Amino acid sequence: MSGPPLVLDAAGLDALAGERPPDLLRALLAEALRRGRDVLCPAIVCAEVARGAARTRAVEAAVARHDRRRAERPAVRLVDTDFALARQVGAILEATGHGSDRVVDAHVVAVCVPAGGGLVVTSDPGDITELASAVPAARVRTTSPS
């Protein structure tokens, strides 16, 4: 896929897992599909959203429903943390003076870096923007899921 990805943080994944995702999120997913853009979500974000049996099932269903094999929807690709991503996350936290309390948000920013940026669906635009300041080569923008 080409161009900056659409990246879901916990609010984005939670909205996607809802019974009826907000119109704005549905529009963003449709636009990502139209433009051939990746839709990414760090796997660690699932730990913030998949709490309790009902929410876990909803997250599983949302990711399965947005499967690359079903061409009508963009695939949500869960990004596992390998050592390269972990180093990038650590560098972001170090550069911004934050500790492990921001490790999940730092993952969201870090998955934008290889593409040179991304559009992050978040309810915490201030946190994401602050962390993104550590990687000025990556243009990270934020939007609310609703």
Image (cartoon, rainbow, N blue to C red):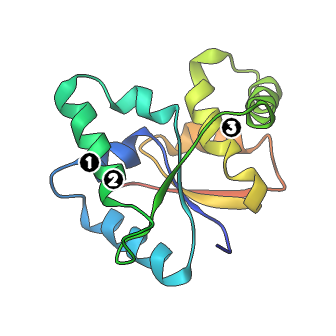
Q: Is residue 57 left or right of residue 97?
A: left
- Judging by the rendered image, the residue that carries numbered circle 3 is 131
Q: Residue at x 56, y 78 (%)?
A: 36
Q: x, y percentage for residue 135? A: 80, 46
Kind of residue indicated by mark 3? Leu
Q: Secondary structure at mark 1?
A: helix
Q: Which mark is residue 61?
A: 1
Rounded to the nearest angstrom, the CA distance separating label 1 from label 2 is 5 Å
Q: Residue 28, located in which quarter of the rendered image?
A: bottom left
Question: Are there few (<14), some (14-19), or many (20+) residues within 10 Å of tag 3?
Answer: many
| Mark 1 and mark 2 residues within 8 Å of each other at the beta carbon | yes
Q: Residues within 10 Å of mark 1 (few under 14, many from 20)?
A: some
Tell me the number on the disc at residue 90.
none
Query: Please, is residue 44 above or below residue 22 in the view?
Result: above
Disc 3, SS: helix
Identity, as a three-letter code, of the amino acid under mark 2: Ala
The image shows residue 105 at horizontal and vertical percentages of: 57, 34
Foreground tag (3 vs 2): 2
Q: Quickly name the residue at label 2.
A: 64
